[in-house]
């Protein structure tokens, strides 16, 4: 378990499927997490069960999905993941979704992402982490920039949501940038 002040990340369990089903069938969660991408949701319970069968067997050397829990109440509030971990290049792609809306805008997603960053830079010694969002998700953009990520590029008009085109915004952070931020904030 990886613990912070607001959140903790723990290994995914089969009973977490019920939360994923709920979040991926909530249009507002789907809109912010994936710009309304129908591949994210809505989904059937059978589809989530198939996905969980795969997620529970992921090799942490390549990818993993964590459950984000509220540290105070202990309940599942979201998910965080890494994928495409390339140990040779020292790179991985991250993601975070807070599915419980009462925790939006309160720092839980930022802390969960920071915990995952600290874990990957620390335990795996990676050189670079990357992630993306869509340009309409200003809360995610602020979160990523606040954690030290830099905007590295855009795929113009690559996302369609609510009948409008948005850019896919790409972010990255290097190990030395993360280390400088950790030292400045007193984190190990």
Image (cartoon, helix red, strand yellow):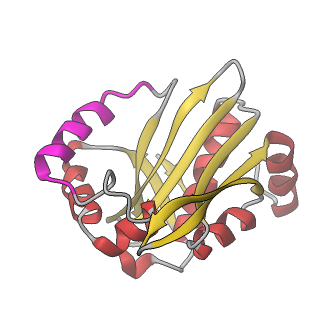
**Among the 4 quarters of the image, the one containing residue 14:** top left
Q: On screen, 75 above or below 124?
A: below
| Closer to the camera in the image, 176 or 42 | 42
Q: Is residue 157 visible?
A: yes
- Residue depicted at 53% across the width and 79% down the height: 106
Q: On screen, 154 above or below 11?
A: below
Q: Which residues are magenta?
A: 43-59
- Residue depicted at 41% across the width and 42% down the height: 65
Q: On screen, 113 above or below 60?
A: below
Residue 112 horizontal/vertical position (percent): 54, 59
Residue 48 highlighted magenta (yes or no):
yes
From the viewer's perspective, tell me whether residue 121 is left or right of residue 83. right
Residue reaching furthest to the top: 88
**Among the 4 quarters of the image, the one containing residue 73:** bottom left
| Closer to the camera in the image, 14 or 163 | 163
**Among the 4 quarters of the image, the one containing residue 120:** top right
- Residue depicted at 72% across the width and 61% down the height: 147
Residue 150 horizontal/vertical position (percent): 78, 56
């Amino acid at each position: 378990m990886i613990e912070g002040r607001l959140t903790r990340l723990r290994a995914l369990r089969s009973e977490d499927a019920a939360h994923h089903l709920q979040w991926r069938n909530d249009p507002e969660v789907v809109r912010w997490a994936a710009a309304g991408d129908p591949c994210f949701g809505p989904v059937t319970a059978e589809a989530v069960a198939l996905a969980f069968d795969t997620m529970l067997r992921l090799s942490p050397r390549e990818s993993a999905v964590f459950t984000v829990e509220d540290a105070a109440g202990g309940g599942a509030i979201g998910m965080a993941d890494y994928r495409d971990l390339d140990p040779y290049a020292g790179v991985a792609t991250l993601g975070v979704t807070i599915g419980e809306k009462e925790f939006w805008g309160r720092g839980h997603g930022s802390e969960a992402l920071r915990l995952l960053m600290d874990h990957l830079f620390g335990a795996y010694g990676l050189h670079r982490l990357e992630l993306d969002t869509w340009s309409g998700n200003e809360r995610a953009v602020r979160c990523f920039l606040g954690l030290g990520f830099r905007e590295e590029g855009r795929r113009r008009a690559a996302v369609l949501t609510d009948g409008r085109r948005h850019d896919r915004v790409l972010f990255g952070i290097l190990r030395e940038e993360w280390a400088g931020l950790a030292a400045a904030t007193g984190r190990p």
